[in-house]
Amino acid sequence: MSRILHDVANGTLFGVALNYQGLLEQHLAAFQQAPYQKPPVKPVLFIKTPNTRNGHDGVVVHPQGERLQPGPALGVVIGKSASRVSAQNAMAHVAGYTIVNEFSLPEDSYYRPAVKAKCRDGFCALGPELVSREQVANPNQLSVKLFVNGELRQQNSTANWVRDIPQLIAEISEFMTLHEGDVLITGTPEGRVDVLPGDTVEVEISGLGRLVNHIKAEELS
């Protein structure tokens, strides 16, 4: 993780679940059943705890006996505190963008993302740098690609978000203050893949470069 990114994106890591149209559509039938009854009407949030922080070229440990899945996402770094801001004014609170690989174990519930699945050491890589807001003409039209050992395994576009950045900031800041340095992980697309020890995982977002991580087997004492 570059020094400038570490210095600027040093706040809370907020993940947004179900923020790609294709992923939401896959789960619509289940959301009509108990205990949900209906699809979510507000952003479904989770937190990546400080121990999950990882960086460019960092190692991600594959827990023994588990499935490990990378999660390519655009990270939005908050530049100044946002409380009850409108969607029209939301972008003024953005410092810039970075690439996020939001690693996780497979989940049973999108409404209640499990800490055990989301918050293991090193499960949130950010980098390789912060790209300022002014350098990205339209964050709602970015290509998001995942490569495993050089092979393209997942591809989508931020054009397929359920909620764009202004809407996310407006809806979240309605009930909680977003502080300078916080990072919004804007969601991972449908089609997550499994990775194994020895794999090299890369997330590429147009205009932001590539974030590289290396998967290593867990060493048990």
Image (cartoon, helix red, strand yellow):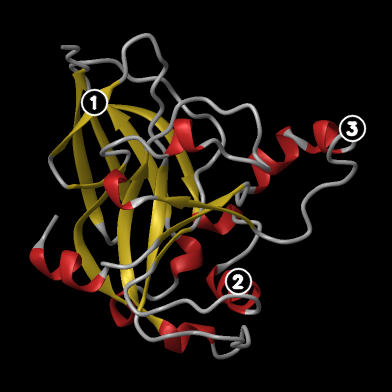
Q: Position of residue 205 (x, y in %)?
A: 33, 52
Distance between the Cα atoms at labels 1 and 3? Answer: 36 Å
The residues tagged by marks 3 and 2 sit, at their Cα atoms, a distance apart of: 26 Å
Instruction: Looking at this view, name the residue that lies furthest to the top.
Output: 65
Residue 128's place in the image compared with 148, above or below, is: below
Residue designated by label 2: 172
Which image quadrant: the C terminus? top left
Q: Residues within 10 Å of mark 3 (few under 14, many from 20)?
A: few
Residue type indicated by callout 3? Gln
Q: Residue 132: percent from the left, percent from the top?
A: 27, 77
Q: Which residue is mark 1?
A: 61
Identified at 58% across, 67% down, the residue is 164
Q: Of helix, strand and loop, which one carries label 3? A: loop
| Mark 2: amino acid | Ile
Q: Looking at the image, do the residues carrying marks 1 and 2 touch, with CB atoms under 8 Å apart?
A: no
Query: Dot 1 lies on which element?
Result: strand
Which kind of residue does numbered mark 1 sit on? Answer: Val
User: If you read the primary sequence from the N terminus, does the residue marked by circle 1 or circle 3 appear first?
Assistant: 3
Q: Decide if residue 79 is on the left or right side of residue 18.
A: left
Q: Residues within 10 Å of mark 2 (few under 14, many from 20)?
A: some
- Residue drawn at x 49%, y 57% is 186
Disc 3 target residue: 33
**Mark number displayed over residue 80:** none
Label 2: element kind: helix
